[in-house]
Amino acid sequence: MPSDTATDRVAHDRADRRFVVLLEGHEARLEYDPVEGGLDLTHTLVPDAIGGRGVAGQLVRAALEFARAQGLRVRPSCSYVEAWMRRHPEYDDLRI
C-alpha cells in the first residue's frame, strides 16, 4: 500500500470531537459525540472536490482503530458509518 494515503493524513481533533483529513485544500471529517464507554459516530462529510477517493472510508477506519486502541465501543449513528461497518465485519466487536 502506498504510504501517501488519506489514512496517513487522518488527524484526531479531540477538542472539536472529529477525525479530519486535509486534502488538496479541502477538509473531510467524521464527527462524533462521546457516550458512556465509547463514541457515537454521528456525521461524515467529504467535499465533492475530493469525493470518490475512499476518504470517508479512511476516516471511519481511523476512528474505529482509535476506538479499538482505547478500549472503546462505537455507535454508528451516521448512515455511511453503519454501511461501512456492515461491509467490514472485522469491526463488529466494537459496536455498542
Image (tube, rainbow, N blue to C red):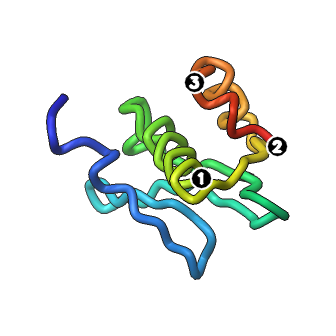
**Which residue occupies the foreground of this view, 31 or 91?**
91
* Placement of 2 over or under 49, stated as above or below: above
Q: Where is residue 9 shown, x and y percent of the image?
A: 30, 56
Mark before the other along the chain sequence, 2 or 3: 3
Q: Is mark 3 on a helix, strand or loop?
A: helix
Circle 1 packing at 10 Å, graded few (<14), some (14-19), many (20+), is some
Which residue is painted at 32% across and 45% down in the image? 6
Q: Answer with left or right where residue 17 lies relative to residue 82.
A: left
* Placement of 64 over or under 69, stated as above or below: above
Q: Distance between the residues labelled 1 and 3?
A: 13 Å
Q: How far apart are marks 2 and 3 (CA)?
A: 15 Å
Circle 2 packing at 10 Å, graded few (<14), some (14-19), many (20+), is some
User: What type is the residue that disc 1 sits on?
Assistant: Ala
Q: Where is residue 19 shown, x and y percent of the image?
A: 51, 60
Q: Outermost residue, bottom direction?
A: 15
CB under 8 Å between callouts 1 and 3? no
The numbered dot on residue 67 is: 1
Q: Name the residue under label 3.
A: 90
Q: What element carries label 2?
A: loop
Q: Answer with left or right where residue 61 lies relative to residue 45.
A: left
Q: Quadrant of the N terminus?
A: top left
Q: In which quarter of the image is the C terminus?
A: top right
User: What type is the residue that disc 2 sits on?
Assistant: Ile
Quadrant of res 37: bottom right
Which residue is painted at 72% across and 57% down in the image? 39
Q: Answer with left or right where residue 7 lies relative to residue 16.
A: left
Mark before the other along the chain sequence, 1 or 3: 1
Mark before the other along the chain sequence, 2 or 1: 1
User: What type is the residue that disc 3 sits on?
Assistant: Glu
**Which residue occupies the foreground of this view, 75 or 90?**
90
Q: Where is residue 67 shown, x and y percent of the image?
A: 59, 53
